[in-house]
Amino acid sequence: MDIYMVILRLIHILSGVFWAGATFILASHITPTVKATGTAGQEFMKYLSGKAKLSDILGLTGLLSLLSGLIMYSLQGWDRQLSSPSGIALTLGAIIGAAAYFHGLFVQRKAITGLQTVATQIEASGGPPSPDLLAQMGAMAAKIEKNGQLLAYLLGAAVVLMGVFQYL
């Protein structure tokens, strides 16, 4: 038994399950609920992304999944991965998973940070938000929702490909 491969696989599976599962729940239930519940939902999301640091945790679990997967992939031999249907499925799953990670890191995180900045500006004003700030907040919330759905689809595809690759 190769203990390093067992450890890498456990890290990959556990972090990937958390990352993908949380993304699915956010896209399918939490984000629509936040949108439907107005101010109360916004306060919940503010706490979840701020003090609870969900974005940071998702970034870390995504990184752990990505790095452990890359190490396992390379240990199997880069040259052998495209020589069979199972290797092609695994490679596609890895590419899609990496695309999801980098989309989350560079696109979704930027939108979340922008929304937090606008929310801070609204709080600092002490009064009702200006129409411009409300429009910015709405646009960023829509972008976060759209990106969250895209991330869920990408991670779903990666999970399916990695789940079935050895049976192809």
Image: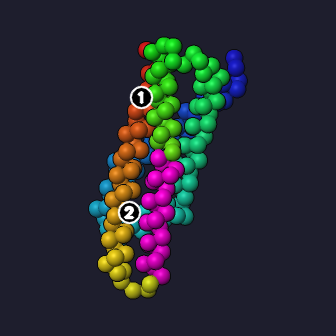
Residue holding disc 2: 140
Q: Quadrant of the C terminus?
A: top left
Going from N to C along the chain, the mark reached first, 2 or 1, is 2
Where does residue 165 sit, x and y in percent of width and height?
46, 20
Q: Amino acid at mark 2?
A: Met
* Left or right of residue 127, residue 94 in this image: right
Residue located at (61% from left, 36% from top): 67
Pointer 2 local density, CA inside 10 Å: few below 14, some 14–19, many at least 20? many
Q: Is residue 155 above or below residue 42?
A: above
* Front-lying residue, 167 or 117: 117
- Expressed as whole percent of the image width and height from the top left, the position of residue 94 reads 51, 31
Q: Are marks 2 and 1 in contact (CB under 8 Å)?
A: no
Q: Nearer the viewer, mark 2 or mark 1?
A: 2
Give whichever of 149, 139 is nearer the camera: 139
User: The N terminus is located in which quarter?
Assistant: top right
Rendered position, 119 above or below 25: below
User: What number is the disc on residue 107?
Assistant: none
Judge whether residue 104 is colored magenta. yes
Q: Which residues are magenta?
A: 103-124
When asked about the image quadrant of residue 133, the answer is bottom left
Count of residue discs: 2
Judged from the image, the secondary structure of the residue bearing numbered disc 2 is: helix
Residue at mark 1 = 160
Percent across and percent down for residue 88 are 47, 20
Q: Secondary structure at mark 1?
A: helix
Per the image, is 71 magenta? no
Label 1 Cα neighbours within 10 Å, binned few <14 / some 14-19 / many ≥20: few
Disc 1 marks a residue whose amino acid type is: Val
Q: Is residue 166 visible?
A: no
